[in-house]
Amino acid sequence: MEDFVYFADVIGIIAGTLVLSSFIPQLHKAYKTKRMSDVSIYLMGLIASGMFLWVVYGIIRKDPIIIVTNASGFILNIILMILKLRYDKQHQ
């Protein structure tokens, strides 16, 4: 049973790393081009809301993998939203 828990933790860490790394290309592109007109603020808002709720769930379950992964994703998503609002305002 202990091996199963360890295996599940490894899967959670890998999954979290993959999800978080998916934000990096968009952050890089946004910073480089100073444009995010084709990215939906509603999508980012929904993702941020979901990640925030996952953090709450992780806290309730006392699961550090869920907490750290989703808190990091929430922060990255908020940064993207800030860049979107800033860059969209500059290009109006």
Image (tube, grey):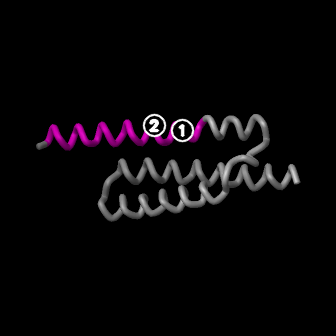
What's under tag 2, amino acid-wise? Answer: Leu
Name the image quarter holding the N terminus: top left
Mark 2, Cα crowd under 10 Å, few <14 / some 14-19 / many 20+, is few
Q: Measured from the top left, where is residue 74 in percent x and y? A: 53, 54
- In this view of the protein, which residue sits in the foreground, 26 or 63? 26
Residue 52 placed where, x, y %? 48, 61
Residue at 60% in and 60% down? 45
Which residues are drawn in magenta?
Answer: 2-24
- In the image, taking residue 60 as reference, residue 6 lies left or right, namely left
Name the image quarter holding the C terminus. Answer: bottom right
Q: Position of residue 13 (x, y in %)?
A: 36, 39
Question: Residue 19: image x %, image y %?
Answer: 47, 41
| Residue in the foreground of this view, choosing between 19 and 68 | 19
- In space, the residues marked 1 and 2 are separated at their CA atoms by 6 Å
Q: Magenta stretch: residue 86 in it? A: no
Give the main secondary structure of the magenta stretch. Answer: helix
Q: Which residue is mark 1?
A: 22
Q: Is residue 30 above or below residue 71?
A: above
Q: Are marks 1 and 2 in contact (CB under 8 Å)?
A: yes
Mark 1: give few (<14), some (14-19) or many (20+) Cα within 10 Å.
few
Q: Residue at x 50, y 41 (%)?
A: 20
User: Is residue 84 rendered to the left or right of residue 63?
Assistant: right
Residue furthest out toward the right:
92
- Relative depth, front residue between 38 and 18: 38
User: Disc 2 designates what residue?
Assistant: 18
